[in-house]
Image (cartoon, rainbow, N blue to C red):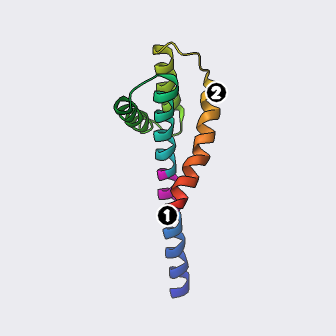
Amino acid sequence: MSGFDDREKAFEQKFQHDQDLQFKVEVRRNKLLGLWLAGELFGMSDDEASAYAKEVISSDFEEPGVEDVVKKVMADVEEHKVDFSEHRLRHRMEELLEEAKKQVMSE
């Protein structure tokens, strides 16, 4: 029975590790997204960009998935009167997710 218990514990630890890693990657993606939007589309200063990136990160805790981030960012895009579609946003988020994975894995 000990072997089974050890395997079960190892599986649970791996699952927890994978969940933690996925969380870090998503937070990093949201930070990268906020910084990119602030600098490239909204023309914010470095301090404003950092604050905005934190807002984007925080928006992801409102509901499961990325829809809360998409809603927040698209509202901000509209507020800043920037021509940027939801499709382009989702594509950029996918690109930044890959970048975030690379960054987190290299740490």
At a point 54% along the width and 71% down the height, the residue shown is 11
Dot 1 amino acid type: His
Q: Is residue 21 magenta?
A: yes
Secondary structure mostly seen in the magenta stretch: helix
Query: In the rendered image, is residue 1 in sight?
Result: no
What is the quadrant of residue 94 in the picture? Answer: top right
Percent from the top left, x then y, of residue 72?
Answer: 46, 26
How many callouts does the rendering have? 2
In the rendered image, the vertical position of residue 70 relative to residue 102, given as above or below:
above
Q: Is residue 43 above or below residue 31?
A: above
Any magenta on residue 41? no
**What residue is rendered at 50% in x and 15% in y?**
78
The image position of residue 19, as x and y in percent, is 50, 57
Q: Secondary structure at mark 2?
A: helix
Task: Say what secondary structure mark 1 lies in.
Answer: helix
Q: Nearer the viewer, residue 56 or 50?
A: 50
| Nearest-to-viewer mark from 2 and 1 | 2
- Residue labelled with disc 2: 88
Give the residue drawn at x 50%, y 57%: 21
Magenta span covers which residues? 16-24
Amino acid, disc 2 = Arg
Residue 87, image x, y percentages: 65, 26
Asked which quadrant contains residue 59, the reply is: top left
Residue 60, above or below 37: below
